[in-house]
C-alpha cells in the first residue's frame, strides 16, 4: 500500500471516528442541552421584567456653507472613533445623567433603580446603557442610546437624560478652548486693573487704560462665543415609552442556553472520546496485528429473550456465528482435542455470549462440545441455554452435542495433576472444549488457562476498552506463550466495518462481506 493510500485511509479513519463519536454523543448532549434550556426558561420566567427605550442623536459636520454663521459660531471638532462611548462611561457624564433625571415623574423606587443601574455602569457592571453608532466614513450618522429600566416611564426618562448629558458633554468640547481664552483675558484684565491701582505715571496710565478697554472688549466677545458654541450632536426626538418588556424572554433565553450547551459540550465530549482512543472500528483492532474473526452487532434484547437456541434462528446471528466458527477452526493447530479459551478484555464485554455462540455453531456442524463456564462469579451460561447447571462435578447436557459445566474453582482447571486428568477425559468424549474465562486483567488464573488452550479468542465490546488496554491484555497473554487467534468485536455499531465501504479505498483486510465456505457437513 503506497503512502497516498495510507494517508487517505488514515484521513478516512479520522473522519469516521469523529462522525461516530458525534453520532453517539449527540443524544446525551441533546438531553443535557434540553435540561439546560428548561432550567434557563424556568429561571427566566421568575426574573423581573426589564423595559428598553431608545433615543437618537445625529452627528453632522459643522460647516453650514454660510460665512456669517460659520464665523459667529464655535463648533466642536468631529468626534473620533470611540470617543462618545468612552464619555458615556465617564464619572462626569454619569453624574450629569443622575442630575438630569426628572424628580416629578419618577417614583422613589424608579429613581432608586436608576441610581443602582448608574452605579453599575460606573463600575462597568451590567448593560443598562448601550450606545450604538451608525456612521459613514466622514463620521456622520446616527448615535442611538438604549436605556433599560424596571418600568416603561423610567426607561424613557433614562434614555432622554443620557442623551442630554452626552450632548452637554459634546457642547463643552466646543467651549473648552473659548473658555480657556476668556479666562486668560480675565487674568490679564485683573493684572492691568491692579497696575492702575498703583498710581502709575500719566503716560503709562493712558496705555494701561487703552489695553484694558481692548481686553474688556475681547472678554465680552469671548463670552458671546461661549454662548454660541455648539457641538456636533443634534437630538432627533424624545424617547418613546416601550409597551413590551425586552427581557426576560424565556423562549429566547432557552434557545440560547440550549445552543450554547450543544456547541460547548459536544466538542468536549468528542475530543475526550478521541483522546481515550476507544476501540470501535475493525481497523482499530487491525492496528494490533491480529485478525478480527467476526463483528457482532448490537442485537435487540428480543433476539436473546429465548436464549441461544432462539437467537440462532436469527439470520444475522447464524451468519456471525459461522464466521466465528470457521475463523477459529482455520487458525487452530491440528489436535485431537481443541481447547478454545474465550476471554473478554473487560468484564461485561460479552465473552459469555461469544463462547455460547461458538459452542452452538460447532455443535450444529457436528462437533462434540464441552462448554466450561470458569470463574467464581460466572452464572450466565445456564440462563443463555435455558438449562439447570449448579456447578456439579460432571457436565450437564444443555443442547444436542453440547454439555455445560460450571466450574467456579479455577484451581481444578489449572492445577497440573487434576488438569491433566480432566483433559484426558475430555479427549475421550469431546472434539472441542470451549472455556468461558473471566478477564485476565481481573483473574490471574485466566492466563494459565490461556497458556494451556489450543487457541485464545479475545472479546471486546465496541467503545469499552482502549487500544492501550488491548495491548496490555495481549502482552499478558504472550507472556505465558498463549496462542491468541484474534479478536471478536462485540456490540459494534453500523459503521464498525465502514472502511471497507469507503469509495476509492481498498476493502478492510481480514473482514469478508461474503459467507465463508463451510468446513464441515452440517448434521441434522
Image (cartoon, rainbow, N blue to C red):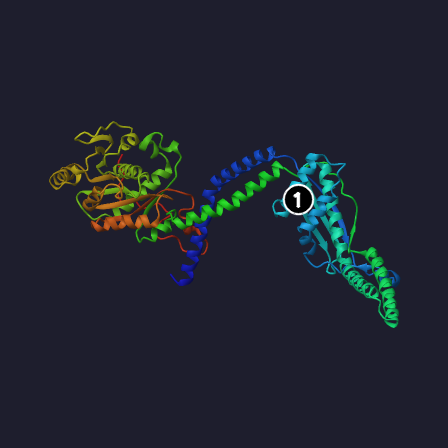
Relative image position of residue 309 (x, y in whole percent): 31, 32
Dividing the picture into quarters, in which one does residue 173 lie?
Answer: bottom right
Judge left or right: residue 383 versus residue 105: left
SS label for mark 1: helix
Residue on which disc 1 sits = 118
Q: Among all residues in the image, which is located at the extreme bottom?
A: 203
Identify the image quadrant of the C terminus.
top left
For image coordinates 19% across by 40% down, the residue present is 431
10 or 163, nearer to the observer: 163
Q: Position of residue 346 (x, y in %)?
A: 31, 42
Q: Residue at the spot x=60%, y=46% of the render?
A: 125
Compare residues 457 and 479 and report the one nearer the observer: 479
Give the residue at x 58% y 40%.
255
Q: Looking at this rendering, what residue extends furthest in the top direction? A: 388
Residue 390: horizontal and vertical position, in percent? 22, 28
Q: Quadrant of the N terminus?
A: bottom left
The answer to whether residue 37 of the structure is visible from this angle is yes
Badge 1: residue crowd in 10 Å (few <14, some 14–19, many ≥20): many
Report the front residue among 276 and 303. Answer: 276
Tell me if 187 is positioned left or right of 477 in this view. right
Amino acid at each position: 500500500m503506497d503512502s497516498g493510500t495510507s494517508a487517505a485511509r488514515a484521513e478516512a479513519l479520522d473522519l469516521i471516528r469523529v462522525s461516530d463519536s458525534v453520532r453517539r454523543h449527540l443524544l446525551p448532549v441533546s438531553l443535557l442541552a434540553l435540561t439546560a434550556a428548561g432550567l434557563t426558561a424556568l429561571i427566566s420566567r421568575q426574573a423581573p421584567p426589564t423595559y428598553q427605550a431608545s433615543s437618537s442623536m445625529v452627528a453632522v459636520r459643522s460647516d453650514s456653507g454660510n460665512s456669517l454663521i460659520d464665523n459667529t459660531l464655535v463648533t466642536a471638532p468631529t468626534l473620533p472613533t470611540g470617543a462618545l462611548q468612552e464619555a458615556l462611561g465617564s464619572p462626569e457624564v454619569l453624574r450629569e445623567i443622575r442630575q438630569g433625571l426628572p424628580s416629578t415623574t419618577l417614583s422613589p423606587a424608579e429613581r432608586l433603580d436608576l441610581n443602582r443601574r448608574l452605579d453599575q455602569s460606573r463600575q462597568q457592571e451590567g448593560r443598562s446603557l448601550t450606545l450604538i453608532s451608525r456612521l459613514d466614513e466622514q463620521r456622520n450618522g446616527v448615535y442611538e442610546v438604549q436605556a433599560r429600566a424596571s418600568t416603561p416611564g423610567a426607561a424613557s426618562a433614562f434614555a432622554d437624560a443620557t442623551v442630554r448629558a452626552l450632548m452637554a458633554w459634546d457642547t463643552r468640547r466646543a467651549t473648552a478652548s473659548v473658555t480657556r481664552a476668556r479666562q486668560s483675558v480675565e487674568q490679564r484684565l485683573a493684572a492691568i486693573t491692579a497696575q492702575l491701582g498703583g498710581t502709575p505715571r500719566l503716560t503709562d496710565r493712558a496705555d494701561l487704560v487703552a489695553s484694558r478697554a481692548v481686553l474688556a472688549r475681547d472678554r465680552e466677545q469671548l463670552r458671546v462665543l461661549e454662548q454660541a458654541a455648539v457641538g456636533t450632536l443634534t437630538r432627533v426626538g424624545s424617547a418613546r415609552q416601550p409597551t413590551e418588556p425586552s427581557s426576560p424572554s424565556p423562549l429566547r433565553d432557552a434557545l440560547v442556553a440550549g445552543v450554547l450547551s450543544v456547541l460547548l459540550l459536544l466538542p468536549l465530549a468528542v475530543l475526550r472520546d478521541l483522546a481515550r482512543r476507544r476501540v470501535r472500528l475493525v481497523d482499530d483492532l487491525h492496528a494490533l496485528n491480529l485478525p478480527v474473526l467476526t463483528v457482532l452487532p448490537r442485537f435487540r434484547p428480543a433476539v436473546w429473550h429465548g436464549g441461544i437456541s432462539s437467537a440462532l434462528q436469527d439470520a444475522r446471528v447464524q451468519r456471525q456465528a459461522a464466521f466465528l466458527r470457521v475463523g477459529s477452526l482455520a487458525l487452530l493447530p491440528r489436535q485431537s482435542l481443541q481447547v478454545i479459551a474465550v476471554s473478554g478484555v473487560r468484564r461485561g464485554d460479552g465473552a459469555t455470549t461469544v463462547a455460547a455462540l461458538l459452542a452452538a455453531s460447532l455443535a450444529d456442524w457436528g462437533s462434540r462440545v464441552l462448554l466450561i463456564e470458569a470463574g467464581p462469579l460466572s452464572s450466565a451460561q445456564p440462563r443463555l441455554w435455558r438449562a439447570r447447571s449448579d456447578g456439579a462435578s460432571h457436565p450437564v447436557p444443555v443442547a444436542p452435542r453440547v454439555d455445560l459445566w460450571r466450574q467456579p474453582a479455577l484451581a481444578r482447571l489449572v492445577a497440573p495433576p487434576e488438569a491433566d486428568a480432566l483433559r484426558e477425559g475430555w479427549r475421550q468424549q469431546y472434539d472441542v472444549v470451549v472455556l468461558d474465562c473471566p478477564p485476565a486483567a481481573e483473574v490471574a488464573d485466566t492466563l494459565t488457562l490461556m497458556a494451556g488452550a489450543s487457541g485464545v479468542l479475545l472479546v471486546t465490546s465496541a467503545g469499552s476498552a482502549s487500544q492501550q488496554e488491548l495491548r496490555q491484555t495481549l502482552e499478558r497473554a504472550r507472556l505465558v506463550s498463549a496462542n491468541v487467534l484474534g479478536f471478536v468485536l462485540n456490540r459494534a455499531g453500523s459503521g464498525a466495518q465502514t472502511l471497507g465501504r469507503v469509495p476509492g479505498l481498498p476493502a478492510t483486510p481480514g473482514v469478508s462481506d461474503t459467507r465463508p465456505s463451510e468446513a464441515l457437513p452440517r448434521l441434522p
